[in-house]
Amino acid sequence: MESAYAVWIGQPVILQIAAEDVRVPLRGMIVGESDDFIRFRVEQAWDIDIYKSMILAVEQDRWTRVLVN
């Protein structure tokens, strides 16, 4: 069975994260997954592992950067 995060891999997303009493949105991209973690890329340069148990929601990032020439 495919995980709930598999459909989001490679797409710009906003993760809603909870840690203790703090809730934080993180903008970036899910680039991988293990049983307990997702690998999340922030600013195209920094990969972090986030416990799946900390993730409250995954939303499509509709405000991706648009380059105008």
Image (cartoon, rainbow, N blue to C red):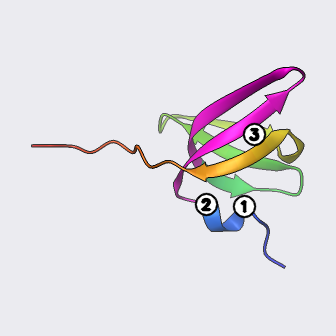
Segment colored magenta: 9-29
Specify the amino acid type for callout 1: Tyr
Label 2: element kind: loop
Tag 1 near tag 3, CB within 8 Å: no
Residue 9 locus on image (x, y percent) = 61, 60
Is label 1 in a helix, a strand or a loop?
Answer: loop
Most extreme residue toward the bottom, as rendered? 1
**Amino acid type for the residue under numbered disc 3:** Asp
Check the picture and name the quadrant holding the N terminus.
Answer: bottom right
Q: Is residue 21 left or right of residue 44?
A: right
How dense is the environment of label 2, judged by Cα within 10 Å: few (below 14), some, or many (20 and up)?
some
Cβ atoms under marks 2 and 1 closer than 8 Å? yes
Crowd band around label 3 with a 10 angstrom C-alpha radius: few (<14), some (14–19), many (20+): some
Q: Sequence order check: which comes first, mark 2 or mark 3?
A: 2
Q: CA distance from mark 1 to mark 3?
A: 14 Å
> How many numbered badges does the structure rendering display?
3
Name the residue tied to disc 3.
49
**Tag on residue 9?**
2
Quadrant position of residue 67: top left
Dot 3 falls on a residue whose secondary structure is strand
- Which residue is denoted by mark 1 in the rendering? 5
Q: Nearer the viewer, residue 69 or 34?
A: 69
